[in-house]
Image (spheres, helix red, strand yellow):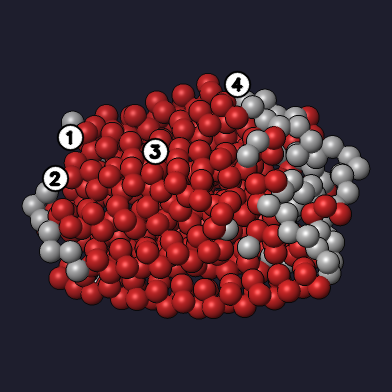
């Protein structure tokens, strides 16, 4: 079996041939992520304020997330065949336009319908922007330490999650117009920052016929690339189960915080503190990853997340609930750094966007279910729902750990039988597009 050292250099330029300046990419992701975070926080809070209904809040959460899945399906192949910077510009301009139209409808008396509509369109645009930002971040990390770049990207995302609810909670105290207007302003700032991002010519044109293929064909190629990497598939499955926990908690938190007699700003404080814990976990995990490996870090993080979610379900007060969510967010941050680093190292260039789209589709598929569960479960039974979701997460983590353990032993055994010398994680180069399935599995064995 060929090892990393046996893989020849690419015969033609690819996205890996030239690195992308890191700072403009990070700034663009920060502006876009903060705008999306403020919108994601503001919509369910405004719906609950306008309707005073737990059912409406759950329905709004589910409706907001379903179009995101369709947007991801379109976004992956689109990013593979188009300039991801241009996709980011379109996303930012579209979000600003949606907010302007939604505010006009809200002023006209549309009420919760206008707010839900803003959430639907902003959510779809956020996922398009996420896929494009992931492509830009992977390109920026090709000329630097991949784990460090992905840790910074995770920190930016969680920083947006930290500041978004905090900023949204403060602005919503003055009414919906200021809070939603800030989303439009941040979107326009993202357009300006995008002008400073420079991509290699090969990245702007697309990198292969895969990028020019249709949406379905592109997603099929992305799914095939993931199937060739069992370790990555198991990591994605574990994170999808963790996202179900996140979905239930995101939908239930405004209701639980209100039940404890707290204001909407207190809801923002919960997510801001959680994002701070995630930032710290991302920084620590980036240093630990070369020694621990992505697979082991993912299993440990998901197990910790299940225990934290169970603690949140049993929390007797606001302070205990906030602490449990901070622990869950820290576990999620560590798992995301592991997944992003493994994904950036293993996925071929030619189908990177499509493979990311398939990954995000799997990871986001539990999100609407969280809103549906909230709409079906009475408020008094929410703790039972949280504990049940935590137990399901624990079961998935156990299955994942056993599967990864078998895969680790099998992959290392196959690599040793072929006479492959282990390559230290930090020294391993990124492989260009066109790697064979055997090469993918050889690199996967070294990531374990």
Q: Nearer the viewer, mark 1 or mark 2?
A: 2
Per the image, label 4 sits on a secondary structure element best described as loop
Per the image, label 3 sits on a secondary structure element best described as helix
Q: Nearer the viewer, mark 3 or mark 1?
A: 3
Residue on which disc 2 sits: 263
Q: Pick whichever of labels 1 and 2 is earlier in the sequence.
A: 1
Q: Quadrant of the C terminus?
A: bottom right
In-image side of 278 versus 268 (left or right): right
Residue 382, placed above or below residue 329: below
Residue on which disc 1 sits: 173
What's the CA distance linking mark 2 and mark 3?
Answer: 22 Å
Q: Pick whichever of labels 3 and 1 is earlier in the sequence.
A: 3
Q: Nearer the viewer, residue 94 or 193?
A: 193
Q: Which mark is residue 78?
A: none
Dot 1, how many residues are within 10 Å of its Cα: few (below 14), some (14-19), or many (20+)? Answer: few
Residue 93, placed above or below residue 383: above
Q: Which mark is residue 196?
A: 4
Contact flag, marks 3 and 1 (Cβ < 8 Å): no
Q: Residue at x 45, y 43 (%)?
A: 283
Q: Quadrant of the N terminus?
A: bottom right
Task: Kindly tell me whether residue 135 is visible in this rendering.
Answer: no
Q: Position of residue 405 (x, y in %)?
A: 58, 74
Residue on which disc 3 sits: 159
């Amino acid at each position: 079996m060929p090892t990393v050292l046996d893989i020849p250099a690419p015969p033609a330029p690819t996205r890996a041939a030239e690195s992308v300046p890191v700072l403009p990419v990070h700034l663009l992701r920060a502006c876009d992520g903060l705008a999306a975070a403020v919108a994601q926080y503001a919509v369910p809070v405004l719906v609950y304020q306008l309707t005073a209904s737990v059912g409406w809040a759950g329905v709004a959460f589910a409706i907001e997330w379903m179009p995101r899945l369709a947007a991801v399906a379109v976004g992956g192949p689109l990013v593979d065949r188009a300039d991801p910077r241009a996709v980011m510009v379109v996303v930012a301009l579209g979000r600003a336009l949606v907010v302007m139209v939604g505010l006009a409808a809200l002023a006209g008396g549309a009420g919760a319908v206008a707010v839900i509509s803003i959430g639907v369109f902003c959510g779809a645009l956020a996922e398009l922007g996420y896929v494009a930002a992931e492509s830009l971040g992977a390109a920026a990390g090709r000329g630097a330490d991949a784990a460090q770049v992905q840790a910074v990207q995770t920190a930016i995302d969680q920083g947006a999650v930290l500041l978004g609810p905090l900023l949204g909670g403060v602005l919503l105290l003055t009414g919906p117009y200021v809070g939603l207007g800030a989303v439009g302003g941040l979107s326009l700032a993202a357009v300006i920052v995008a002008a400073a991002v420079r991509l290699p010519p090969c990245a702007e044109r697309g990198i292969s016929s895969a990028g020019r293929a249709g949406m379905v064909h592109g997603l099929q190629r992305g799914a095939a690339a993931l199937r060739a990497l069992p370790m990555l598939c198991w990591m994605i499955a574990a994170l999808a189960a963790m996202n179900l926990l996140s979905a239930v908690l995101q939908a239930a938190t405004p209701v639980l915080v209100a039940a404890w007699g707290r204001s909407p700003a207190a809801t923002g404080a919960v997510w801001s503190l959680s994002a701070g814990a995630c930032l710290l976990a991302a920084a620590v995990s980036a240093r630990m990853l070369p020694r621990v490996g992505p697979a082991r870090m993912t299993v440990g993080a998901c197990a910790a997340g299940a225990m934290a979610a169970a603690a949140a379900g049993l929390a007797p007060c606001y302070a205990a609930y906030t602490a449990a969510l901070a622990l869950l967010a820290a576990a999620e941050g560590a798992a995301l750094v592991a997944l992003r680093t493994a994904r950036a190292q293993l996925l071929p260039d030619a189908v990177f966007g499509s493979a990311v789209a398939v990954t995000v589709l799997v990871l986001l598929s539990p999100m609407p279910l969280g809103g549906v569960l909230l709409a079906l479960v009475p408020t008094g039974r929410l703790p039972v729902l949280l504990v049940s979701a935590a137990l399901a997460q624990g079961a998935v983590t156990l299955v994942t750990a056993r599967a990864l353990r078998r895969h680790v032993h099998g992959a290392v055994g196959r690599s040793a039988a072929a006479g492959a010398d282990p390559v230290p994680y930090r020294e391993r180069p990124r492989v260009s597009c066109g790697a064979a399935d055997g090469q993918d599995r050889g690199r996967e064995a070294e990531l374990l």
